Image: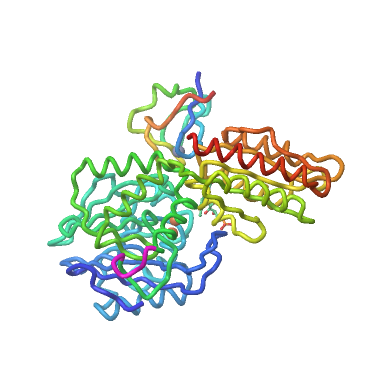
Amino acid sequence: MRPVEIAKGIYSVGVRDWNIRDFHGYATDQGTTYNAFLIVDEKIALIDTVKNKKQFTQQLIDNIATIIDPKKIDLVVSNHTEMDHSGGLPHIMHYIGENKPIYCSKMGKKNLAKHFSRSWNYHAVKNGEELSLGKKTLAFLETRMIHWPDSMFTLAKEDGVLFSSDGFGQHYAGYELFDDQVSEKIMYEAKKYFANILMLYAPRIKKLIKGVTDLGLEIKMICPDHGIIWRKNPAKIINAYNAWCDQTPIRKALVVYDTMWESTERMAEAIADGLIDENVITKLMHVRTCHRSDVITEMLDTRAVLMGSPTLNNQMFPTLMDNITYIKGLKPINKIAAAFGSYGWSGEAVKFINKEFEAMKFEIVDSGIRVQYVPTPDDLKKCFQLGVKVGKLVKES
Amino acid sequence: MDKYVCVLCGYVYDPEAGDPDEGIEPGTKFEDIPEDWCCPVCGAGKEDFEIEE
Ligand SMILES: Cc1cc2nc3c(=O)[nH]c(=O)nc-3n(C[C@H](O)[C@H](O)[C@H](O)COP(=O)(O)O)c2cc1C
Ligand SMILES: [Fe+2]
Ligand SMILES: [Fe+2]
Ligand SMILES: [Zn+2]
């Protein structure tokens, strides 16, 4: 990615990772970027240092070198310890001088020390602390547990440019750099990012947004560490975050299942027919075809969750449990739910799914449907009826 | 003495153990910890702690 001056004296110097498709278990169908920013003032600051891969850290240095001699960098800001943003530190610090200061949060200092053995010159900043670069001032804003203990934002005050680390990011590598250059499909990637990384911290994010709004700061541009920069309309992504934090469901039902000999699948389809009959937005997802990171994205605004599994060795099918473990951690709210599944002789799967619904505080609206072996037309009618029943409830709420 | 849990990260403050790294002696009640103390795991302030059930 060639550097671009995004505001006077502020350059985007990060890198694109076009072909990554598995980002710590998150399906990144569009690749991603590791953004980093260079601020050239009386002092020169580098914000974040891309992923710990030689090819990227070298590219970062090469990018900076097109603007200034990288050795002239006076300080580094580390907004977040995770390796996709701090991984370049060893390479960068070696290049610019190991004694140059690294500004980070208090937890950043602790956590960086647990990732890198070198004892760098850390400056742990307090929430709201400022640092003058000459004409420009950086203000640091703690965002603990959004999404790591060390996470913080940095604001270039005079320019109104917010460096928001993972916040407002999207796993998307394209030729575009700004929101006004991409199509609406970027909102799916932003939503997917929120659902997979931030959903569990929704109450804190809501508070943070309110806190920042109340401060009355003028934010003209939001620069996340992944994907495109919000410059035309930063309010758009902030409003979207507010809505996603509330998880207000739409008229939607999600049918998530696995199947061995297609019996549970036929049940899933009959349930979907019932839902569609009620004019509810319906989505069917087979969990060995659809990635869990897409399932959770659909989960964000769905009202109803129907989960189906055959019984395998007295258990539910393991891929369902994979999805449940993932969903449980991300803490979706406002869901109604029902389970279904085909079985041969013991049929425990539905019972176990219901138990998980309870653990996730989903409201169980039907005890569920179990069918022995292959569903009869009568069984499928019952499934259809379950779809209708849940569909009506979705419309009521 | 009540244990307190950090609602952000799940760390549990156990008064019996205190937080010696931050100078909180074993046997210190949560209420008696200085207000500027924060969660040793995630940095949350005292206001982000709740009594553990
Ligand atoms: C999205 C995400 C969520 C995480 N959640 C937790 C968590 O809840 N508790 C925790 O102790 N660590 C959490 N971690 C931190 C990882 O466990 C930590 O980075 C670990 O060193 C990764 O080990 P690995 O290199 O074997 O993957 C999380 C990391 C990521 C990327
Ligand atoms: Fe991160
Ligand atoms: Fe990241
Ligand atoms: Zn904590």
Can I make out residue A224 in this image?
yes
Q: Position of residue A186 (x, y in %)?
A: 39, 63
Using residue A62 as the reference point, say whether residue A249 is left or right of it: right
Using residue B15 as the reference point, say whether residue A35 is left or right of it: left
Q: Which residue is found at the position 44% from the left and 63% from the top? A: A171
Q: Which residue is found at the position 43% from the left and 67% from the top? A: A172
Q: Which residue is found at the position 40% from the left and 43% from the top? A: A245
Considering every residue shown, the one lying at the far left of the view is: A135
Q: Position of residue A222 (x, y in %)?
A: 28, 58
Q: Quadrant of the N terminus of chain A?
A: bottom left
Q: Which residue is found at the position 50% from the left and 21% from the top? A: B2
Considering every residue shown, the one lying at the far right of the view is: A345
Q: Position of residue A376 (x, y in %)?
A: 80, 46
Can I make out residue A311 in this image?
no
Q: Quadrant of residue A352?
A: top right
Q: Position of residue A273 (x, y in %)?
A: 63, 49
Magenta span: A179-184
Which of these two is toward me, A364 or A90?
A: A364
The way the protein has been coloured in the rendering is: rainbow
Question: How many discs appear?
Answer: 0
Q: Quadrant of residue A26?
A: bottom right
Which of these two is toward me, A249 or A358?
A: A249
Q: Does the stretch in magenta take in A24?
A: no
Which of these two is toward me, A24 or A279?
A: A279
Considering every residue shown, the one lying at the far top of the view is: B1
Q: Ligand 3: which quarter?
A: bottom left
